[in-house]
Image: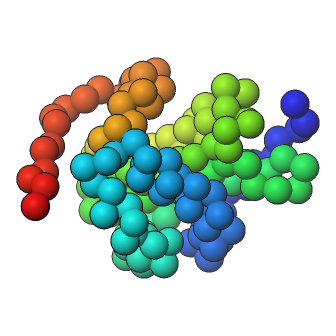
Amino acid sequence: MADVTYLELGPESLELIRPLWEKLNVHHLVRSPGFRQHYEQMTFDVRKADLLKKERLRVIIAICNRAPVGYCVCTVAGDTGEVDSIFVEDAYRRSGIGEQLMYRALAWLKAAGPEKIIVAVAAGNEAAIPFYESFGFMPRMTVLQLIQ
């Protein structure tokens, strides 16, 4: 595997992750059939606008061969820090990139000093839970949504 460089950037760099975020959205759309309409209607521009409403935002991008291959977006709002979005291209998974993105995100979040740090896992993506547990996250509750 080629060398990976990590860039830690601010909100102005969100546009750089658009293609990767769109792949993540398809990933969720395929795995969350009950919420297909949500993911079909969710656009990067809507997600970006929501993220920009947060008090503080960090974008961490993994670059390999001059191309983004993974990213993590984390934010702080009030007393809560959050790993809002993380994605690594299929070809680069299980190579340590996801772990590096999380280590860097958690270091930034802890330095920001929120009372709690959370991560939400989309329905159908439960396979990601052990990854988050390896960083000390634990399930606190399960929220169900009525499908209408």
Seen at 25% across and 49% down, the residue is 34
Give residue 107's position: percent from left, percent from top. Answer: 54, 41
In what quadrant of the picture does the N terminus appear? top right
**Colour scheme of the rendered structure:** rainbow
Q: Report whether 50 appears left or right of 14.
A: left
Q: Residue at x 33, y 57 (%)?
A: 36
The residue nearer to you, when weighing 18 against 5, is 18
Residue 132 vs residue 38: left or right? right
Estimate the x, y position of residue 43 in percent, counting from the top left. Answer: 45, 72
Residue 22 position by quadrant: bottom right
Residue at figure coordinates x 25%, y 29% from the top left: 139
Task: Say whether residue 134 is visible.
Answer: yes
Please indicate, yes or no, whether residue 114 appears anywhere in the rendered image.
no
**Residue at 50% over, 41% down:** 106
Where 53 falls versus 115 (above or below)? below
> Picture quarter containing residue 120?
top left
Q: In the rendered image of this protein, does residue 143 appear above or below residue 130? A: below
Q: Compared to 93, does 29 lie above or below?
A: below
Instruction: Name the side, left or right, on which 46 lies relative to 87.
Output: left
Image coords of residue 94 (percent x, y): 67, 26
Q: Nearer the viewer, residue 141 or 106?
A: 141
- Identify the image quadrant of the C terminus: bottom left
Q: Check the image and report above or below for 3 versus 29.
A: above
Q: Position of residue 101 (x, y in %)?
A: 62, 41
Q: How many marks?
A: 0
